[in-house]
Amino acid sequence: MKKYFRILALVSLLVPMALQAQKTEKVINVIPYPQSVEIGKGTFKGAGANFNCDLEIDSRSAALIRQLADKITFVSGRTNSFATPVGLRRSLDTKKAKGFFFLNDSSLGAEEYSIEITPKNCVVKASAYNGFLYAIQTLKQLTDPAIFSDRINPNQKFLFPCVSIKDKPRFAYRGMHLDCARHFFSVEEVKKYLDIMAVYKLNQFHWHLTEDQGWRIEIKKYPKLTEVGAFRNGTMVGKDFNSNDGVRYGGYYTQEQLKEVVAYAASLGITVIPEIDLPGHMLGALAAYPELGCTGGPYEVWTRWGISDQVLCPGKEAMFTFLEDVFTELMEIFPSEYIHIGGDECPKTEWEKCPDCQARIKALGIKADDKHTAEQYLQSYVTARVQKFLNDHGRKIIGWDEILEGELAPGATVMSWRGVKGGVQASALGFDVIMTPNTYCYFDYYQSEDKEKEPLAIGGNLPIEKVYGYEPFDGLDASQQKHILGVQANLWTEYIATPEYLEYMLLPRMAALSEIQWCKSSDKNFDRFASSMKAESFKIYDILGYNYRKF
Ligand code: ACM
Ligand code: ZN
């Protein structure tokens, strides 16, 4: 009995000590949190330190490293000389060498990196551009947020904590979407959006470019898409679906501008995936070319939000020629492996009445069954034709989860948005999946229950804690998990008309998203995340001029 009490006493002593140790465990303020972190003692002074860059590093990565050297030089006023000595790796004695050392390590994956910081030096290893990029993003969050600033500060030492980091992402696809169709955002605004994505190591920008409310890309063969389809005669006011502010609204990107965004994103390690949403959400195109619809119009670029019954007509061969022409120009602009073809929210009411659609159904021998209507199978036919065209040109399709309704050809990737259901179903059928469930990843939803205090939003409630808590493998067995390429959040802009409001809806929820995308679920910790947000990320937003919601 005595022994029992002694053990009990020891346990009651040790448990609080362990809890205390957990609480005071040192962490670094880096988001997304790296996979392996060992914190040492002391700091390394970045201001004035030499930058040394292995000759085996490619010129793009070297330019990136030089930018970091130039930044430290500029802000601190202390010169950081940049060198590329021959045979650096063989002669480097990391115990003695002083300064920054960037080394090529071909044993690391393309998005992997390591950082070793001692009071003498900072040694970074990666094998490819994105690895160096992510190492640099981590370094920037390890030191003073002034690293993001353009303000000269001669007192700035740029101290880096001594730490050993080994890091790589959990998911290959780490996306953020932006709807530039409901509201139009300038090239500069899109670049600013990409800049903050890069801070959190996101690597896919899903750009929603066509809608009922506006067509936003220049297509040379179809000039009316932008002359007519890019502008609407007003916009509904607030949630009054019968209203119109009477202010003509619109805009589009020229092909040169789109290429500029693609190149800019690439410099940030981000691939741009364009979306042409079809066969629904097409009033922008129909207003310009009414012959592409079932009734022949007339159509108008929509001035209200919602789902229009007026959609493309798959009974007309000219509609497919149109799509192939559009995708041909699109592929010249966007080199991405994936092209998003939409597929969501396509009402079938016009197809049910349209003689051309019904003739197509008959000619194809499509029959309704107990699972789907003939018109749903007709949408599968549209998806399959566009998919084949893009596959023949070396591209793969992504579609919203409605593309599962009917039949889906192998090789398509499904974006699960109506909750996780589509992702569960598609992965069980062997399709690759990107999880973007509205329940966790719709950043057009409110950020608080207290909606009166928030700007007008589409609805829902998605506070940052809920975003952070999303686990993409929930409900999936091992064979399904292999098909989850990654996670993305979507930012639809019906009610978001200004860059300030856009940033407010994006930040800081995108930071929470980045930990779902990058971190192992066992490394996630909301308290650590929240305290790092306050210590580092909010300062970065302030310096870079982003509007954000505090929590
Ligand atoms: C969607 O939110 N309609 C994909
Ligand atoms: Zn039709």
Image: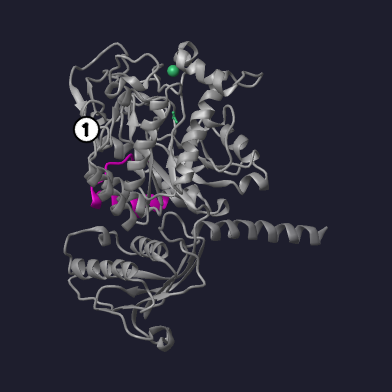
Instruction: Relative to 42, say whether 283 is above or below.
Output: above
Report ligand 1 position as a quadrant.
Answer: top left
Q: Quadrant of residue 295?
A: top left
Regarding mark 1 in the picture, which secondary structure is present there? loop
Residue 234 drawn at (x, y percent): 22, 19
Left or right relative to 392: residue 430: right
- Taking the spot 62% from the left edge, 18% from the top edge, the residue there is 368
| Prevailing SS of the magenta stretch | helix
Instruction: Relative to 528, say whether 161 is above or below.
Output: below
Density class for disc 1 (Cα within 10 Å; few <14, some 14-19, many ≥20) is: many
- Taking the spot 49% from the left edge, 29% from the top edge, the residue there is 382
- Range of residues picked out in magenta: 531-551
Query: Can you see residue 406?
Result: yes
Q: What quarter of the picture does the C terminus occupy?
A: top left
Residue 151 drawn at (x, y percent): 17, 60
Confirm or reject: label 1 Cβ below 8 Å from ligand 1.
no
Instruction: Relative to 268, say whether 125 is above or below.
Output: below
- Taking the spot 55% from the left edge, 58% from the top edge, the residue there is 22
Identify which residue, 313 or 459, lies in the foreground: 313
Residue 242 drawn at (x, y percent): 29, 11
Residue marked by disc 1: 251
Q: Quadrant of residue 224?
A: top left
Judged from this view, the residue extending furthest toward the right is 1
Query: Can you see residue 178?
Result: no
Q: What quarter of the picture does the N terminus occupy?
A: bottom right
Confirm whether the magenta stretch covers residue 535. Answer: yes
Q: How is the image coloured?
A: one colour
Confirm whether the magenta stretch covers residue 484. Answer: no
Identify which residue, 445 or 212, lies in the foreground: 212
Left or right relative to 351: residue 230: left
- Taking the spot 52% from the left edge, 32% from the top edge, the residue there is 401
Identify which residue, 406 or 13, lies in the foreground: 406
